[in-house]
Image: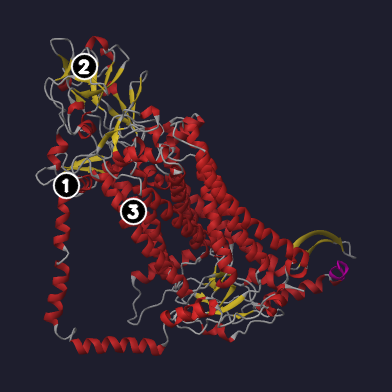
Amino acid sequence: MAQDDSGSSELAETSSTAVEHPVEDHRLGDPGTAIVVADAPVNPGFPAHRPRLTDTDPKQNRRAERTVFTLFYLSIAGSVWAIAAYLAFPIESGNLADVRTSTLFIGLGMVLALLGIGIGAVHWAKQLMNDHEGIDIRHGVAGSEETRERAIEIFEEANEESGFGRRTLIRNSLIGALVAFPLPAVVLFRGLAPQNVDPIKELKHTMWAKGTRLTKDPTGLPILASDVTIGSVFHVIPDGLNDREDALEQKATAAVLLMRLRPEDLHVSPARKDWNYHGIVAYSKICTHVGCPVALYEQQTHHLLCPCHQSQFDITHEARVIFGPAGRPLPQLPITVDDQGYLVAQSDFHEPVGPSFWERNS
Amino acid sequence: MTTETAIAETPRIKRDGFFGQAANYLDERTSISGVVKEFGRKIFPDHWSFLLGEVALYSFIVILLTGTFLTFFFQASMAEVVYNGAWVPLKGIQMSAALDSTLHISFDIRGGLLMRQIHHWAALLFVASIGLHMLRIFFTGAFRKPRELNWVIGFTLFVLAMAEGFTGYSLPDDLLSGNGLRIISGMIEGIPLVGTWINFLLFGGAYPGTAIVGRLYTLHILLLPAFVLAFIALHLVFVVVHKHTQFAGAGRTQQNVVGYPILPVYAGKAGGFFFIVFGVIVLMASLFTINPVWEYGPYDPSPISAGTQPDWYIGFADGMLRLMPPHLETYWFHRTWSWFIIIPLVILVVFIVLVAIYPFIEAWVTGDKREHHILDRPRNAATRTAIGAAGVTFYAAMWAAASGDLIATHFKFSIEGVTHTIQTALIVGPIIAYFVTKRVCIALQKKDRAIALHGYESGRIVRLPGGEFIEVHQPVDEYQRWELVSNEGYAPLVVRPDSRGRITAGTRFRAAMSRWFFEDRLAPLTQTEIEAAQHHGHGDAPAVEGGSH
């Protein structure tokens, strides 16, 4: 960066003289398909400098000065205000209104403190500091021919002195070693996830098992089949989920929506004819798209809508996708009732729930 | 008496005074005087659009300051605790330590909520200003040689800023951000071959696990900021090496930089501007609530609220996911191909890569190897501006899709209608934007040319002695004219055989690209044409010209 342009020249007051043009020809490089016009329009050079009001009118000058220091003093006042507001507005009540008041008044004090400095400094620079523009001369970004020659020479000398290009065995073995040495570090990151767990197996089953009761989310109370009236919808978790250490992880796969439709509205395929109980059906709540909970049920149309990406599933047709980006239906949980009349699962889901993954069908 | 004379009369600093001695002490130990000599009077050109990059830099400083404050209170842990803080509605509810400490910052520490809100608003402004800064660079052609690498550095900063935003957004472990993580996790799972394992490693086992917040925290406050700082430093070093670009103007050439010196004017303006940006961010944070996590509650995989939205800068990616049609999944070779993930990811990656390498594409098409320090007016690079408009439209369609549900509920449309409309706009919109922009640019070039040659319409109708009515055109002065005529002209590449007498497919392709790029161009004006027009104008109605003064 040791260039000789540090002392920028300042435009003279009267410099409406045309800029010297010979330099224009020094632009290095192939112009490509640019047309270099011999008869290009002539740069008229710098217009005459126009003094500001503050340059010519001492009154305006003093006024600008007053404005600047007033703003700086206001800034000090703002800082004091912010500290005073910190002390004056307690938030310990836990009342949102108190928190908002404290936030507002501390904030406004800081705003005054910051804008006072900012606007003052800009005003000072624009109105009172010397407003004569300066010029720096550009040089090509590339180093000079000499420097470049010398740089190449240095590399050649270094190559010669070390034998980097000549001693190929040393060079290649070094490159090999440098490629290999970060690999252990990469392998160490295997430790990010537990060692003896197979993610593919994990993704293929949920907490549901034969006889697991369907319970309400989040209370965990079992659901009597007779309580599920036509048109109603229940957010369901498996019995015992709340007692588990990994409750959130289990819930992320086992969450289920329970709905009751009129049995004649359901189009049931032969393989699933025993999966519903008098029109009560249970479907995975985890969207097959990217895994959001499909929480919105339209009672009239029997459609489930995912609020994240608007996939829609038709419950009357075994949750097939009717709109949105999802690729396949929500998995159905086969249910029945136990001897006390509570809804229970017949088994786990028959396919992995949630978003698709590479090994899903393997 | 003017200030200039006042400056001239100011006595020079005494070299043996306190400051003189302090400076001497420093210089003898640091050689700092060389730096002052080199940079103290360095010239920076002025234009409002040059401030966009400054806004980005300053909001990042604000982010660093407030973020450091927040780290003293935030617990990046997913250990389950029972909330017992000041916010009554959540009392007694199980949540992670991360959300507990976020609520603690918001409700128990005075000014804590303010700091959180400054941090969040500054982050939004950071990404927004980088985006606008990139658009400015793009549409003015500031990415041309020698600044192509700095464009790539800036682009990397944009990606890093989005990563910073997303990791920070996920830290409080509230319901909204948890669903955002669920979406990311689902997207990663859909990636062929490696997705399942990447997801498994990232979350440290089954989703959501207990590791992700701590890991994102390390990324958010250590790794990513280090990269951002390093790239900002590199970015600024190159700004100094290249010297800043400037718009065309009288006296300005490719060989000079015209503007104000760092000391004192630029330091005053830019330093002041930092405080203004800071002040405006604090004003937003004082007045407008952002990310009220206390309303969302702790993350739970089962509940969700309608109208779920990511922060604005992730919207384009989320929107692309929403625009996919149904049933895009196939089972080949006993493996699941989730095209509804693969296609959006490929589209996003191609779009982003095209943005990153655009300077090299344009350089290849034009073959121009000269340095460019004078900025293009967007209209003068019609095809580039049209490409940019098409890109912006494409981005806007994706972005709008991320709010498709809100558009539907707010304007009482069906969600299907909104989605199908945006799907159409995604494909047709950029094409329309391209052609409309190109035509508008060429029309504006013609208008510029008419003004440069014949002056602007004065609105004064004059009747000539012969009975003819004319509108008097007022000529522009030579300085204004220069701004209108100083653009460069290009011609399409001509196909020529290479040294072995062959015309390769590559040459033909490049020539075709070049023909397309420079289609419908206007040849730049020459000095002769300008002078001829002036003579013509003077000769036409000298009496009128004279009469107007």
Cα separation, mark 2 vs mark 3, equals 45 Å
Compare residues A94 and B280 and report the one nearer the observer. Answer: A94
| Left or right: A83 in relation to B3 | left
Q: Which mark is residue B221?
A: 3
The residue depicted at 47 percent of the width and 73 percent of the height is B240
Residue B481 horizontal side relative to residue B303, left or right: right
Look at the picture and state if A63 lies above or below B242.
Answer: above
Q: Which chain carries label 1?
A: A
Instruction: Name which residue lies at 22% across and 30% down.
Output: A251
| Residue B547 belongs to the span the image colors magenta | yes
In which chain is the residue bearing label 3?
B
Q: Residue at x 55, y 76 (%)?
A: B41
Residue A36 in sight in this render: no
Q: Can residue B9 be spotted in the picture?
A: yes
Q: How crowded is mark 1: few (under 14 residues within 10 Å), some or many (20 or more)?
A: many
Q: Residue at x 58, y 54 (%)?
A: A76
Label 2, on which residue? A222
Chain on which label 2 sits: A
Residue A193: mark in rendering: 1
Label 2, label 1: how far apart the Cα atoms are: 35 Å
Q: How crowded is mark 2: few (under 14 residues within 10 Å), some or many (20 or more)?
A: some
Q: Which amino acid does label 1 sit on?
A: Ala
Q: Find residue B289 and report its horizontal and vertical position in percent.
A: 48, 39
Using the image, determine if residue A52 lies above or below residue B439: below
Q: Do labels 2 and 3 share a chain?
A: no
Instruction: Please give left or right for residue B439 compared with residue A197 in the image.
Output: right
Residue B182 lies, in percent from the top left, at: 29, 39
In the depicted structure, whether residue B475 falls above or below residue A88: below
Question: As shown in the figure, which amino acid type bears the numbered disc 2?
Answer: Pro
Q: Which of A175 and A314 is in front in this view?
A: A175
Q: Distance between the residues labelled 3 and 1?
A: 22 Å
